[in-house]
Image: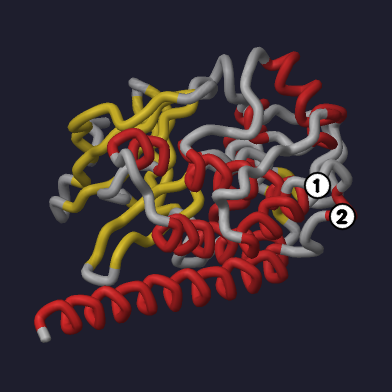
Amino acid sequence: MSSQYQILELLGQGQFGRVFKAIYIPNDSLVALKELEKKRFSTRNFLREINFLTQLKHPNIVAFQAIEHNEKGRYLVLDYWDGGNLRHFMQSNNIISSIQSLKIIADVLAGLEYAHTRGIVHCDIKPENILLHQSETGWTACLADFGIALSQDCTEINLGSPAYMAPEQFYGQFLPTSDLYAVGVVLYEMLLGYRPFSGSPGELMSAHLAQPIEIPNTIPLLLRSILSTALQKLPVRRFASATEMLKSIQLALIVEQSSVNTEKSQQIFNIKEIIS
């Protein structure tokens, strides 16, 4: 049986498989094909990801369209996001404004808020799993890759990305606030250009578990407070929910936008003073 999809290019590769840009031939539309290798990603996990994706219908979560199974492999057919992922965006932009960063994080938290209320913890928030789309109003972000997501009542040992993992994830505990910790690491990286901790997986584990977070004073006070709360070692000291963290991000966005507008007004006033 011939495939209805024509693969155009490789978009990315992760620990369980690859993602391709493809054309759905019947209507000539672009889609993303997520190939999951059977040896690395069991049928049980494959079905679990499909189950989660079919439950999650939200503008800030990548939409699942279909399953493609042919002689070359098995694929999830997903919406194609033309802006690539946040990692590529960060690497191609030397400076990302705080307003831009906060808008992207707000979208991520909106998606997490929706998932968490349905009992699903993502478990692997990182720039590679945040997809972007640019429109006239700016960048929109969505969450991708629920391949290792868990229901909140699950206690199995899971995998993740050590650079973004909350302390409790290293000993097998996965909570909604674990996702919020990872969001804090992503925001830290967007604002400062580097992550709070680096090193080997073992060094990262030790740092996440015991090393204090250092937040430079160059970061505005409200943003320092948000980072400090999100990156607490103990889950109970973090934001209680994605909703609570989202409200703080939205407040910080208002403050940052007001500051930029005030600065622009002052510049215009100074120019008028010089001219007069």
SS assignment at label 1? loop
Depth check, front residue: 48 or 56: 56
Going by the image, does 203 lie left or right of 49?
right
Q: Position of residue 187 (x, y in %)?
A: 55, 49
- Mark 2 surroundings: few (<14), some (14-19) or many (≥20) residues within 10 A: few
The furthest residue to the bottom: 276
In the rendered image, is residue 192 in sight? yes
Q: Do the residues labelled 1 and 2 touch (CB within 8 Å)?
A: yes
Closer to the camera, 228 or 158? 228
Task: Using the image, tell me which numbered label, if any, was put on residue 105.
Answer: none
Describe the element under mark 2 as helix, strand or loop.
helix
Q: Is residue 63 visible?
A: no
Sequence-wise, the earlier of marks 1 and 2 is 1
Residue at the spot of label 1: 232
Q: According to the image, label 2 marks what residue?
A: 237
Residue in view at x 85 percent, y 38 percent: 173
The quarter of the image holding the N terminus is: top left
The quadrant holding residue 239 is: bottom right
Does 81 sit above or below residue 155? below
Examine the rendered structure and indicate whether residue 270 appears above or below residue 168.
below
